[in-house]
Image: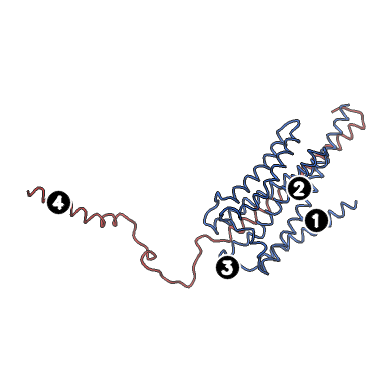
């Protein structure tokens, strides 16, 4: 009951934050060279942060499942993998819309964009494996998730190591007042949304487990 | 050698006329090719607003569809759980 109340309170808080975020973004100053299109940044970059976090959650939960054989960890891993794919999709669609105006092209096969696409494909492969892999695919998929998590630091640092069109990691720490507040507000709102969706999706998997157990007891 | 002279004259004429002929086959020049004309207001070739709206729409549509899918799947599982529980209580089979 307490958990339900906590979930409801967080849901109300996140809904309020997401409703207020567009006002903050609209009031944020324009970037000098890109103008209006740079405002995509306030949801694009936080979605990227959530994607990285979700890949870590999925990888760590998968490692716990692999070595500890805990079904609860597997449920969290599956939920986190779906959310990694969801937020990855948001990043991979909103990015090209920004790039079309800022760079003049929809896509460039540079290190950040390509490695982000590979990360997204790894977690899509995880979900396909879980869906169509048959018996034992949970452990195989857990290995894929650990591999996917290991890929995250390479995606993050790729802009600093290789010459890319994508802005470097120094952009966020160097944000000016006026841009900094809406950015971190959007990060907090999307992190809250992520926690809510992770809890809801894990709950679904828990109920599915209970249903399977009921079917087994029915057959016995 | 009047034939050679005539051929040389024709060739020279053709070479001199070639730039003019190629220029005539191209589309007429616009004013921006020849000079820059200042204006008070300028329209952007690629407006940013549709791209920004498109990006935010992707975020919202993605999140709403995913929340809807969780809700649908959870409702289906809950229905099935209730059915199986009832069958189990009545001692039936799958």
In the image, is residue A163 above or below residue A82?
A: below
Closer to the chain start, of discs 2 and 1, is 1
Same chain for the residues under marks 1 and 3 in the image:
yes
Name the secondary structure under disc 1. helix
Judging from the image, the colouring scheme is: by chain
Q: CA distance from mark 2 to mark 3?
A: 37 Å
Which disc, if any, is residue B8? 4
Q: Are marks 2 and 4 in contact (CB under 8 Å)?
A: no
Q: Residues within 10 Å of mark 4 (few under 14, many from 20)?
A: few
Farthest-out residue, front: A161
Name the secondary structure under disc 4. helix
Same chain for the residues under marks 2 and 4 in the image:
no
Occupied quadrant, residue B59: bottom right
Q: Residues within 10 Å of mark 1 (few under 14, many from 20)?
A: some
**Which residue is the site of mark 2?**
A57
Foreground mark, 4 or 1, reads 4
């Amino acid at each position: 009951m307490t958990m339900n109340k906590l979930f409801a309170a967080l849901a109300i808080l996140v809904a309020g934050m997401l409703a207020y975020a567009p006002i903050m973004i609209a009031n944020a100053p324009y970037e000098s060279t890109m103008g209006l299109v740079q405002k995509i940044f306030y949801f694009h970059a936080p979605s990227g942060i959530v994607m990285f976090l979700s890949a870590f959650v999925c990888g760590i939960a998968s490692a716990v499942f692999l070595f500890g054989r805990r079904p609860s960890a597997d449920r969290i891993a599956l939920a986190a993998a779906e959310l990694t794919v969801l937020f990855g999709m948001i990043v991979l669609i909103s990015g090209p819309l920004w790039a079309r105006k800022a760079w003049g092209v929809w896509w460039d096969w540079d290190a950040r964009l390509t490695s982000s696409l590979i990360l997204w494909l790894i977690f899509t492969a995880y979900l396909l494996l879980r869906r169509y892999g048959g018996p034992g695919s949970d452990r195989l998929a857990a290995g894929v998730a650990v591999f996917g998590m290991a890929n995250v630091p390479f995606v993050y640092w790729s802009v600093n190591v290789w010459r890319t069109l994508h802005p470097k990691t120094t952009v966020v720490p160097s944000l000016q007042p006026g841009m900094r507040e809406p950015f971190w507000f959007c990060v907090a709102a999307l992190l809250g949304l992520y926690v809510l969706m992770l809890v809801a999706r894990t709950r679904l998997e828990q109920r599915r487990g209970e249903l399977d157990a009921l079917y087994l007891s029915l057959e016995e | 050698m009047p034939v050679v002279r005539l051929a040389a004259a024709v060739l020279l004429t053709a070479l001199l006329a070639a730039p003019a002929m190629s220029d005539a086959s191209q589309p007429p020049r616009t004013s921006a090719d020849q000079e820059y004309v200042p204006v008070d207001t300028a329209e952007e070739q690629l407006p940013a607003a549709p791209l920004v709206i498109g990006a935010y729409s992707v975020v919202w549509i993605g999140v709403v569809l995913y929340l809807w899918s969780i809700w649908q799947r959870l409702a289906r599982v809950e229905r099935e759980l209730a059915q199986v529980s009832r069958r189990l209580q009545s001692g039936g089979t799958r």
